[in-house]
Amino acid sequence: MSQIRRFFALPEERQGDIVNVTSEYHHMARVLRMKAGDKAVICFNDGWEHLSVVENIDGKSVVLRIEESRVSSAENGYLTTLYFGVCKGDKNDFVVQKAVELGVNRVVLFDSRYTVGECDDKKLERLNRIALEASKQCGRAIAVQVSRCNFARLTEELKNYDIALFCYENQREGTVFDVLDSKPVKNIAIIVGSEGGFSPEEAQAAVDAGATAVTLGKRILRAETAPLYVLSLTDGILGRTK
């Protein structure tokens, strides 16, 4: 199914094996100029993918019939939320795109004491578009959502995870391998700071909320490199044990 165009439809657009797509109508009908008989993969953001054929296109919707359904092999056996400090420029775009490719389920940008970047509603909308396109491009059956919060809210949410990795630049021992190796994990949070890193008070607050501080090694990683490094390690470890 990976060689056929992929689209995300709303659950209410499906009636049995018939899908009446209006949410992606412009892209399918106007941009791609699809026609009756064309194949498409339709996803409803639930981890399943459906090989479908276009039956009809009118002035406002694309009608498809589902021919085959299966659980997507592109989704991990565990859920990952990436929290990362808002960065300057287009670094946020890069991190969101690559995080989706690496299997993250949710991305949350946060403000902390040393963040210098900004993420207003317009930028957040752009990041969600980037996440959607990345989800399609890499064959995901989940359309990853991007949101934002402050650091206090972040610490409140940590109770919802089996493990929370707090990637702290001043941590000198304890690696991702030490925390994750051979441990069953279904829901993990990864917390990475912006260019300015974290204050000691923020680090303590994260640990007090249940996070485990880890080091990312002896080299200093850029803000946009660190989350991708940790996501890759996590997938290597948990993907082996799931």
Image (cartoon, rainbow, N blue to C red):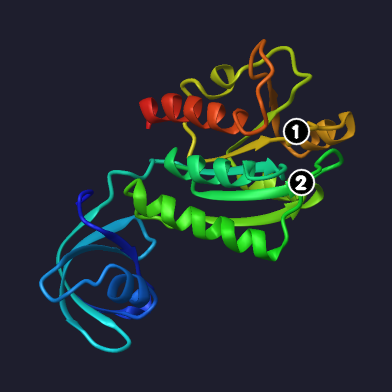
Identify residue type, mark 1: Glu
Q: Tag on residue 195?
A: 1
- The outermost residue toward the bottom is 59
Q: Write down the residue under mark 2.
A: 117
Q: Report the number of numbered marks.
A: 2
Inspect this view and state whether residue 216 appears.
yes
143 relative to 20 in the view: left or right: right
**Residue 167 image point, x, y percent:** 68, 28
Looking at the picture, does residue 4 appear above or below residue 59? Answer: above
Q: Which element carries disc 1, helix, strand or loop?
A: loop
User: Which quadrant of the rendered structure holds the C terminus?
Assistant: top left
Judge by depth and name the residue closer to the eye, 57 or 231.
Answer: 57
Name the one closer to the observer, 198 or 222: 222
Residue occupying image coordinates x 67% and y 37%: 191
Percent position (x, y) of residue 78? 44, 41
Depicted 31 relative to depicted 103: above or below: below
Tell me: 40 left or right of 81.
Answer: left
Query: Which element carries disc 2, helix, strand or loop?
Result: loop
Q: Position of residue 18 (x, y in %)?
A: 20, 78
Q: Residue at x 68, y 46 (%)?
A: 159
Identity of the residue drawn at 43% across and 41% down:
101
User: In 3D space, how far apart are the residues under numbered discs 2 and 1 (Cα atoms)?
Assistant: 9 Å
Contact between marks 2 and 1 (CB within 8 A): the answer is: yes
